[in-house]
Image (cartoon, rainbow, N blue to C red):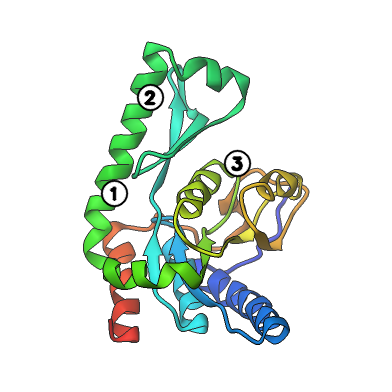
Amino acid sequence: MSTAILFRDRVAAGEQLAPEIHRLLDKIAAVSNVAPYPIVYALPRGGLPVAVPVARRLRCPIDIVVAKKIGHPQNQELAIGAVTADGNVLWAGQTSIALQNSPTGKIALEAALSKAKLQMAVLNSGRPQQSAIAQQTRDTIAILVDDGVATGMTMAVAAQTLRSQNHIAVWLCTPVAPQTLLPWLEQWGDRIVVLHTPKSFLSVSRFYEEFPQVETRIALACLQQQKLWLGR
């Protein structure tokens, strides 16, 4: 069964996502008479090219939350949970919860955590000044962006990290996600912004004409270009 292409590439997806997020923020400002201050958080590496047009439209910084799937000890393609670079963990289902205290489960968790920490270290140089971010988070809306959601595990655990900070709200934003996943996602964010919710959903890549792996240099360029654009 064929799947309709929804986006040319990640940048085009971000250009479509940006005005919808902007419209919702403007709606909040009109009701409250206070313009909320957004900060865009991308899930690297794939979420960064999507996040750039969003941050440009909102005229705000881009930061990252690094999250990695925890692979099943017998099948690495099967995610049993996810972990962020700062150690937030989310397990998927009862089988995964049973595994988390087993020796193999602990090894799988440590492997995923090491990958997350390594990626954070590699991308850290492109991030905005954290002192400036920290001063702003008390009155900000965290806009968490990825290029698509298949299982939701990494987005959910990243949202946990953002909730532990002082943001007034956490929004989960993506160009495409399965329709059946939306009720589950709603427990992790204050608002869900999804452009397309196909009933048939095999993989995120099927909805993009071009979906190459985002190389580290491209991910760093996304972060650094936004810093320069904002003059920070």
Q: In which quarter of the image is residue 86?
A: top left
Residue at (69% x, 50% y) in the render: 186
Where disc 2 sits, the SS reads: helix
Residue at (42% x, 39% y) in the render: 88
Q: Is residue 221 visible?
A: no
User: Which residue is identified by label 3?
Assistant: 151
Q: Is residue 83 visible?
A: yes
Where disc 1 sits, the SS reads: helix
- The first of marks 2 and 3 along the sequence is 2
- The first of marks 2 and 1 along the sequence is 2
Gap in angstroms between the C-alphas marked 2 and 1: 17 Å
Determine whether 140 is above or below 181 in the image: below
Tell me residue 200's x, y (percent).
75, 46
Around disc 2, counting alpha carbons within 10 Å, would you say few (fewer than 14), some (14 to 19), or many (20 or more)? many
User: Which residue is identified by label 2?
Assistant: 108
User: Which residue is identified by label 1?
Assistant: 119
Front-lying residue, 8 or 160: 160
> Is 209 positioned to the left or the right of 100 in the image?
right
